[in-house]
Every structure is written in structure tokens, then in C-alpha cells.
Image: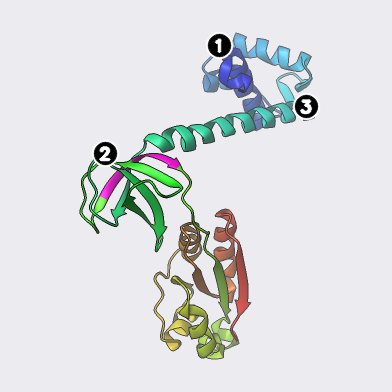
Amino acid sequence: MSDVLENKRAATRFRILAEIAERQPAVSQGEIAEAVGVTSQAVSEYIRALVEDGLVEKEGRSRYSVTKEGVDWLLQEATDVRRYADRVTEDILGSVREEAAIATDDIEEGQTVTLSLSEGLLHASPGETGPATGAATTDAEAGADVGVTGFEGIIDFEPGTVTVYQVPPVRSGGAGATDADALAAACESADLVAATGVEAVVALGRADREPATTFAAGEVAAAAADRGLDAVVVVTADVVGRVTDALRDGNVTYEVSDLS
């Protein structure tokens, strides 16, 4: 485990070095002391040790900068802390949190259930036949919501796909320059269709398809793909970056195509 998590002095050293990195080169030891919760004298001693260890370079009175070695140490410790936090969140808290699922059959409280994703929603079935299981915390009839905790295993599903179709802006022909038949065919097999931009919404109307949302289309599509759904996003070319940025932020693989 990281020294930062095991040793109080290492944790304080980490926080002070991070504060120096944020404030450099003009560093107020008083401000750092207030932020970290130690005395100014303690900050001075820590900085002196950081300079001696080659993690901080003194450039003059109250002027310091973090060295390459200091940056490397910060990154390594931060990575270790992040891995620990991820393990706590996913492996420890993930097994004790309670989630709601749709019961596929009658379920009794305390019964072991198999978990699956269907149409982007968590489902629970009586028994432990699947790779992901949990324990029911409530009674439920088929089709009702049931509480589930004690998660084990990984739900078996394939992430969905996202295809982004661009519609020209109105000055370049807008919805009228879009092949409505091609757009209708593109949307036919999609689990979710979203749109951004007036031209995109009108183009979908010409294709006789109503979008599920016309707001935050990239974020919605990313969430859908993360739940195993295939999504189509129709977007006015002028604002396609908003959608693709959201998809990249969600670590979603996508394709961009034109329909003109």
C-alpha cells in the first residue's frame, strides 16, 4: 500500500508538495499551513526536507518549484491512492451497497439471485446460475422492483455502440440536404436515438423518427452504451464536437458519418 495511506507524515508530505505544485513559484507557508492543518513551522520543516530530498527546488525567498523528481513522486503516490480508492469503491462498497433491479420471477427476501442487463436495466432472476449474483433484500413479484445487495462476479454483457450522424447546418441545406430514407434505416436497429440541434431534430422528423432526447445527447448515448444499448446520435454539424467530447469523456467508442 502507498506510504501516503499508511503513514501520517508521508500523507502530510504529499499534501504539502501538492500545495506547492499548485501555488508555485510564489509559495505562502501560512496559506499552506491553513490548507493542510498544520503549523507554519511544520510546513517550513517539511519544505526544508523536500528541498534536501530533491523534490522541491528553492528559487529565492518564498519562491519554490517542484522538481521532475517531485512530480514523479506525486504522480506515483496519487496513482496508488486512486487504485486503493477504486478497490474500496468497487470491491468493498460495491458488495454492500443496495441496488434496485427488476424481478423476472417471484423473489423472496434473502434469496440468491442472478443479475443481468436487459434494455439497459438491471434484472434479477431467482437462482445463482449466472456469472453475477447477489442477495435479495426485499420480496418481489415478477415485474416488480427488488432490492439487491452482496454483489459478486461481473455481469456478462457487451458494451453498446454509438454512431453519430451529421446533418448540415441550415445555411448549407440543413435537414433538406439529408437523405431521410438513409437516416430512417440508420435508426431502425438502434435501441436509442438522440438529437442535438434544430436541423438534426427536423431531419429525424422527416425520417418519421422521434428522438428520445434533444438535450445532452452525447452524455445520454454514452450512458446507454455503458449499459449495453446501441445508440444513434443525430447532430447538426456545427455542434458535433459537443457530442464527441462527451463520448470521449465516457470512454465510448464511436463512429461519425454523414447523411447528406
Q: Are marks 2 and 1 in contact (CB under 8 Å)?
A: no
The residue positioned 58% from the left and 14% from the top of the image is 7
For the record, the magenta segment spans: 146-152
Whole-percent x, y for residue 246 in the image: 55, 59
Q: Earlier in the sequence, mark 3 or mark 1?
A: 1
**Residue 39 got which mark?**
1
Give the labeled residue for mark 3: 69
Give the labeled residue for mark 2: 110
Question: Within 10 Å of the Cα at label 2, are there few (<14), some (14-19), or many (20+) other Cα atoms?
Answer: some
Quadrant location of the N terminus? top right
Given residues 127 and 60, the one toward you in this image is 127
Whole-percent x, y for residue 166 in the image: 58, 77
Cα distance between the residues tagged 3 and 1: 26 Å
Whole-percent x, y for residue 108 in the image: 22, 45
Question: Within 10 Å of the Cα at label 1, are there few (<14), some (14-19), or many (20+) other Cα atoms?
Answer: some
Any part of residue 105 in sight: yes
Image quarter for residue 12? top right
Whole-percent x, y for residue 186 in the image: 52, 80
The residue positioned 55% from the left and 30% from the top of the image is 84
Residue 17 appears left or right of 209:
right
Residue 204 appears left or right of 67:
left
Residue 182's place in the image compared with 212, above or below, is below
Residue type beneath disc 2: Gly
Question: Within 10 Å of the Cα at label 3, are there few (<14), some (14-19), or many (20+) other Cα atoms?
Answer: few
Scheme by which the image is coloured:
rainbow
Residue 48 appears left or right of 88:
right
Nearest-to-viewer mark from 2 and 3: 2
